Image (cartoon, rainbow, N blue to C red):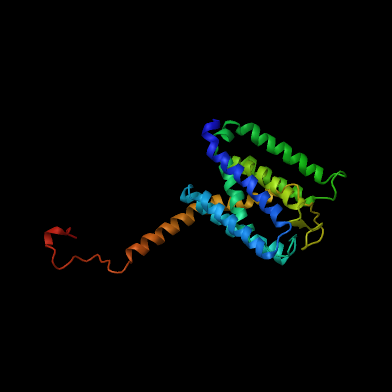
Amino acid sequence: MVRASRRDLAVVGVVLVWIPLVLWLDSGSSLGQQHLLGLGTWALLVALLRRESALVRMQTAVVIAFATAVEYTFADLLGTYVYRLDNVPSFVPPGHGLVYLAAYAFGRSALAHRWERPLVAGTIAVGGAYALWGISPLAPRPDALGVFWYLCLLGFLLWGGSRLLYVGAFIVVTYLELVGTAVGTWAWQPYDPILGVVSMGNPPSGAAGGYGWFDLVAVATAPALLRLVSRGRQAARGAAPGWTSRPSPSASPASHPTR
């Protein structure tokens, strides 16, 4: 089982090393240096995706598009959480791609499938304990959003079709949220900026449950998008210059099927 999981777990390991390294380097970087970190993150993502199927590449693209729209809405526009330089860093969009790819790789690994039941049960237990801690007097500040997102995660784990993907997302997202807020790359506001009544931890305890919506959208829409792209390519090849369905004048009538 371990040997069969080696490549998938290597992807997870690379992501869990690379993104914290980027976050640490960003903690004192200029805007130009931040752009270089973004280029490096894009390069790593492209390199890892080269060995993936067309479906996984499409799912990753969907996550990047959806997550980037969310970033610019909730970080840049609403200020739900704020990045160090008051921008959306260039490494964030490909970073979302890496997070999804790591969660997906973990979820499909033979080792994860071997231990599926305890992994799902453990995620439910640890995530629930973390969410309860977030609304207890022990937490630095109240975290109602974390409880809501945990309930989302619970739904994905109990009724979702890719439970191990959400287990992977819980591991990766929780880890990176704790690292990112600890080094000061971003910080969550104490209350939501829309109603001003929903308390939020820094980070929210159930952040992986919120991220699970990205995964759900990717899994649900990528197959249809892939078929659409395939049809578009076939149509483009059919409409290429010089292509014709009519027989050439020099060909004999017997060489063409009767209609």
Q: Residue at x 60, y 40 (%)?
A: 164
* Percent x, y of residue 137: 88, 45
Q: Is residue 240 shown above or below 59?
A: below
Q: Residue at x 25, y 66 (%)?
A: 244
| Residue with the most extreme right position | 137
Q: Is residue 116 shown above or below 203?
A: above
Whether residue 160 is visible: no
Q: Choose between 243 and 224: the one closer to the eye.
A: 243
Whether residue 122 is visible: yes
Q: Choose between 17 and 142: the one closer to the eye.
A: 17
Number of numbered tags placed on the structure image: 0
Q: Quadrant of the N terminus?
A: top right
* Res 127 → quadrant: top right
* Percent x, y of residue 190: 82, 56
* Percent x, y of residue 57: 50, 52
Left or right of 212? Residue 181 is right
Q: Quadrant of the C terminus?
A: bottom left
* Percent x, y of residue 191: 81, 58
Left or right of 103? Residue 253 is left
Left or right of 106? Residue 229 is left
* Res 112 → quadrant: top right
Q: Residue at x 58, y 39 (%)?
A: 9
Q: Residue at x 77, y 39 (%)?
A: 129
